[in-house]
Amino acid sequence: MSFLSRCCLVIALGCSGLKAAGPLARPDTPLTDPAHDPAWSTLFARLSASKTRQSRFEERRYFPFRSTPVVLKGIIRIIPERGLSLNYLEPDRRIMIIDAKGALLRDAEGRERAIPADARAQTVTSALVSVLRFDVAELQKSFVIYGRHEGTTWTLGFVPRDPAVTEMLGSLVVSGEQNQLNRIEMTRSATQRIEIIIRDQQEDVIFPGDVIDRYFR
């Protein structure tokens, strides 16, 4: 599987312990039922609302053989019934579509290539969809969830329940402020990780038909 496929969620982590390496440490407090926990229920309900969304993102990929990260920029679009679309604008233009059919890459000329539906790719894309949709029920099936509040900011960590998945993917950490998701971090090792910074979030976006045709399927 290509590194791009693994990055798709948003994005695989490879650490085998419970704490993710890197700047954004996983919180230590387990959340057994976050959807009904008074300290978390409002946030989870707000983030999991079935709404169309659009955000700008900056993806930073850190490698042990580079002193600076590889930086990619683009736009995330989400239509609950169609899935999500990652429109990479820099340094190269391409689109990644993730929906019920799987994952699809579409280049600037409209040529398409499906990402192989092997078990590892399916696990990664499933995690990506669940996190960006904040699908709590699906996340709880596959991950133990940890959380921490610091004023208006919050951090959530997701650790796979299946040791085999932990060995393959590791865990992931997301953070935000108030009712917005601002950052996703996936750590493969102390020197190899992916950060996704999310900005300019919009909700209840009305996407024109040509935009739907271009960025979804």
Image: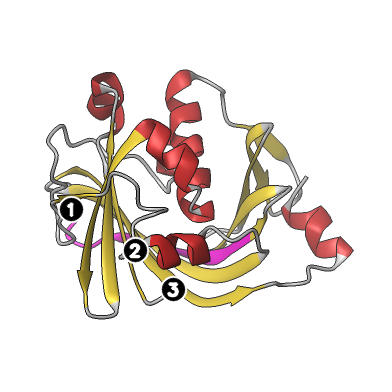
Q: Is residue 4 visible?
A: no
Q: Which residues are magenta?
A: 66-77
Across and down, in percent, residue 173 comes to: 28, 53
Q: Could you classify mark 3 by the number of other residues whose Cα lies within 10 Å: few (under 14), some (14-19), or many (20 or more)? A: some
Measure the alpha-carbon separation of dots 3 and 1: 19 Å
The foreground one among 193 and 112 is: 193
* Residue at left offset 30%, top offset 65%: 39
What element does badge 1 sit on?
loop
Q: Could you classify mark 2 by the number of other residues whose Cα lies within 10 Å: few (under 14), some (14-19), or many (20 or more)? A: few
Q: Is residue 158 above or below residue 132?
A: above
Q: Earlier in the sequence, mark 2 or mark 1?
A: 1
Measure the alpha-carbon separation of dots 2 and 1: 21 Å
Does residue 203 appear to the left or right of 10 in the view shown?
Answer: right
Q: Amino acid at mark 1?
A: Arg
Across and down, in percent, residue 92 comes to: 54, 58
Q: Which residue does the numbered mark 1 point to in the structure image?
A: 26
* Residue at left offset 44%, top offset 35%: 124
Q: Which residue does the numbered mark 3 point to in the structure image?
A: 179
The foreground one among 61 and 10 is: 10
What element does badge 3 sit on?
loop
The foreground one among 62 and 10 is: 10
Across and down, in percent, residue 150 comes to: 19, 74
* Residue at left offset 88%, top offset 62%: 209
Across and down, in percent, residue 105 comes to: 63, 42
Check residue 72 for magenta coloring: yes
Q: Which residue does the numbered mark 2 point to in the structure image?
A: 38
Q: Is residue 15 visible?
A: yes
